[in-house]
Amino acid sequence: MGLLEGRQGLIFGIANHRSYAWHIAQALISEGAGCAFTSLPDERMQERLHDAVAKLDVKDPWVALCDAGKDEDLDRVFSSYADSFERLDFVVHSIAFADKTYLAPGNFVDTPRKEFLQAIDISAYTLVGMAQRARAQMAKGGGGSILSMSYYGAEKVVPGYNVMGVAKATLECSTRYLASDLGADKIRVNAISGGPLRTLAASGIAGFTSILKGVPERAPLRRNVEGSDVGGAAVYLLSDLSSGVTGETLHVDCGFSVSAM
């Protein structure tokens, strides 16, 4: 029997089969979990989502359209999910957005107010919004686990990561405060700080190829992270193996973050 046999949850953020969220879903399903999915209400993104889920070999997948930047969309998704499933054991938040105009080295200082706040809203506040709506159903089932995706640019300057780094720092701090608020309901909240992976989102960061080339030179494991590395860590954080872990940001980056030089 798998570590997540009988567990059911929601995954936000699969853009294609290279997404971290896809690798997480693959790992969760392999351990017996049932996964429901969301897609941006955009025809192209819906096609990508369905193609990616097909590669997971999920029969008749549950998919809801959701622009997480809209409260009414989050309300509708969690209400619809509650009507369809008795349990909500986990939520995976793997969404982020920043205007790529300002994701280039030296451009952070020029970030306008609107774009700055938009990055924080989509990349960080949405985690709070999802936790608000997941709380009652998770508590009803005896607890649950919420997981988000971050990156080392939240802690140190990564050229070109810019406002996304500020947003991820907000995400990591929100993880700790949510863990404090939701612990009484036996809901754990953690984040994974994954190493660079060639995803659709990463393509908008100028100099990303250089980042990929530089990691194996400094990381103790002498390689870049793979999607399966993060998938395995997600199984740990969403299963009872991590029953005493909450409010943490787990680095899954082949050790890159521990190296000073």
Image (cartoon, rainbow, N blue to C red):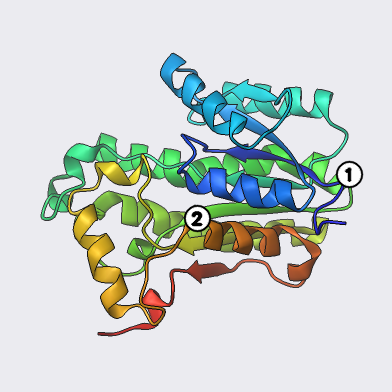
Q: Residue at x 49, y 20 (%)?
A: 47
Q: Residue at x 43, y 77 (%)?
A: 255
Mark 2: which secondary structure?
helix
Q: Looking at the image, is 255 positioned above or below residue 122?
A: below
* Left or right of residue 62: residue 55: left
- Could you say where residue 3 lies in the image, as x and y percent from the top left? 81, 59
Residue 208: which disc?
Answer: none
Q: Looking at the image, is 225 positioned above or below residue 129?
A: below
- Could you say where residue 203 lies in the image, as x and y percent from the top left? 28, 43
Q: Residue at x 43, y 44 (%)?
A: 123
- Could you say where residue 137 lies in the image, as x and y percent from the top left? 82, 39
Badge 1 crowding class, 10 Å Cα cut-off, few under 14, some 14 to 19, many 20 or more, is: few
Residue beneath disc 1: 140
Residue type at tag 1 = Lys
Rendered-image quadrant of the N terminus = bottom right
Mark nearer the N terminus (2 vs 1)? 1
Residue beneath disc 2: 227
Mark 1: which secondary structure?
helix
Q: Looking at the image, is 135 positioned above or below residue 80?
A: below
Circle 2 or circle 1, nearest the eye: 2
Whole-angstrom CA distance, mark 2 to mark 1, is 32 Å
Specify the quadrant of the image occupied by residue 131: top right
Specify the quadrant of the image occupied by residue 76: top right
Viewer-side residue, 159 vs 222: 222
